Image (spheres, rainbow, N blue to C red):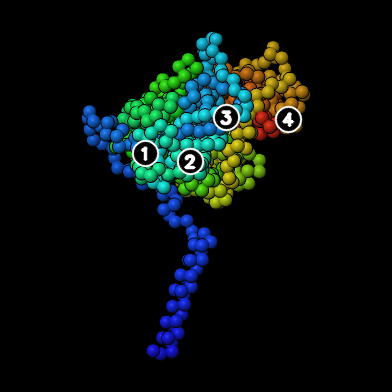
Amino acid sequence: MSTRKTTLFYAVLIAIASLAVGMVIASRLDLTPTSSAQMVALPAMNSNPIGGSIDATTFRTIAKQSIPMVVNIRTEQRQRTQDLTEFFGGGGGGGGDDLFQRFFGQPAPSDRPQGRRPRQRPEGQLTEGAGTGFVIDKSGYILTNNHVVEGAEKITVAFAGASRNEEYAAKVVGRDALTDSALIQLTDMPSTPLQEARFGDSSQMQQGDWVMAIGNPFALGHTVTVGVISALDRPFGGTATRTQPMIQTDAAINPGNSGGPLLNIRGEVIGMNTAIYTDAQRQANIGIGFATPINTIRELLPQLRTGKISRGVIGVEISRDPITKDTAKEFGLPNTNGAVISSVTPDSAAAKAGLQRGDVIVEYNGRPVTESDSLVNMVVATKPGTTVPITIYRDNQRKTLSITPGELDLEAEANGGRSMRRPDSAQPDDQTATDFGMQLEAISPEAARQLEIPRGRGGAIVADVDRDSSAARAGVLPNDVILEVNRQPVSNVSQVTRALQNSAAGRPVFLVVWRVDRNGGGREYFITMTKR
């Protein structure tokens, strides 16, 4: 063997030996990377069209095939408040909360029968809660609702057919308040293999499609209910400042169903049961339930399994009203697509990019913005720190800017809510009515101080807004200070009133108002109103 070949042979031999020794050392020191089998894989999704007939055994078959992958979840946590409602009756997630208040941000209707008072429990007392989940990976990963496991000190899981007290411990891997989803993992595995859920395509679902819910209502484990899709894209749930598009169903969902699967007629998960609309009289299902679309949760899974959810935010508030043909004409838009910026947060990504109130965003990262929700979805899906192009219309001209979204902080955003404090301004007798369903009053020196109105600006304070009026639908709030009408500064109530009364019915009116938030800071908002 030649010297060259001998050298090559020994070099290869040494490399192989070094690799083997390195693997042994690494295994002893636990330095080897986690195998893919230990990570929850992104579940496959069946996007084939849903079809076929339903017979007498269809739902029986779905239930038989799907129940093994559904689990009952029991939690223990320290009570954080003394005021508990009886809404859950011991069978709801988190040991007791009113979903009407959780998802609508207001107390339940005051029609509770007289004589019944909420239970009082001392703060810090250990309480139990119950919910539902479903297995998505044989290594013990389970999806459920965030509100089922939030704050839990102990989580146990029970499977269908298990004997009494046969439970398995679990831990939280990742949680997300916005979609109300959580990924947990069994730390104690059963001896039999786990059955995984099969994922369908929630974007295929239409009103009238049959669905089945499986859950643990009122601790009655593995209960099956059947109904239809009642509506799609309901803005619901989420957090104090944001909503999520939800699937509405009349399949019976009750306290304890939280986190369970909503299945199509192929037995595939197309949603996670999350909330119900109810009141204090019924305290249970009245045919209006909500499920988070499974496509939304599936896309979030890679982040849930890392334990950190990262979303983009650009620092603008968007008008919820759709752009009409008349409004589009005033903005110089070619059609009614786009999202109107009502306010820009100082020092935000939007402010640094040069965006202004009144701008209309028509494209984001090369994709058309059809309406406000589509823009929000694109922004939150953007990785923070990524620079993308954004196209706007300003003063009837099309412009393209570059923007670098920051990272969304849901808690900080929720703490920046609006204030409804009443300034010491003019008396009610001094209020002036408008044709838009709001009453105006003059700005007194004391009101200017309390509301921190920019010096030398402002024409009138909104004293009151009629329910269902044009102003209310546009988002005008009491204590808003009108600074501009149709892009012209105003300095007194008479100027504001004259400009509003002279506007033609059906034509858009542009306002710029000053609004104080809960933290005492003020900001300008752009609002579009239309006289009816």
Q: Please, what is the three-letter code of the amino acid marked with disc 1?
A: Met
**How far, Cα to Cα, is label 4 from label 1?**
57 Å
Q: Secondary structure at mark 4?
A: loop
Q: Nearer the viewer, residue 136 or 527?
A: 136
Q: Nearer the viewer, mark 4 or mark 1?
A: 1
Residue 528 place in picture, x, y as percent: 56, 29
Name the residue that disc number 4 marks. 452
216 sits to left or right of 470: left
Q: Which mark is residue 38?
A: none
Say which residue label 3 marks. 126
Q: Residue furthest top?
A: 114
Left or right: residue 484 versus residue 93 is right
Which residue in the structure is indicated by mark 2?
170
Q: Mark 3: give few (<14), some (14-19) or many (20+) Cα within 10 Å.
A: some
In this rendering, the label closer to the viewer, 4 or 3? 3
**Amino acid type assigned to the residue bearing label 3 in the image:** Leu
Is residue 247 something that shows in the picture? no
Checking the image for residue 69, the label placed there is 1
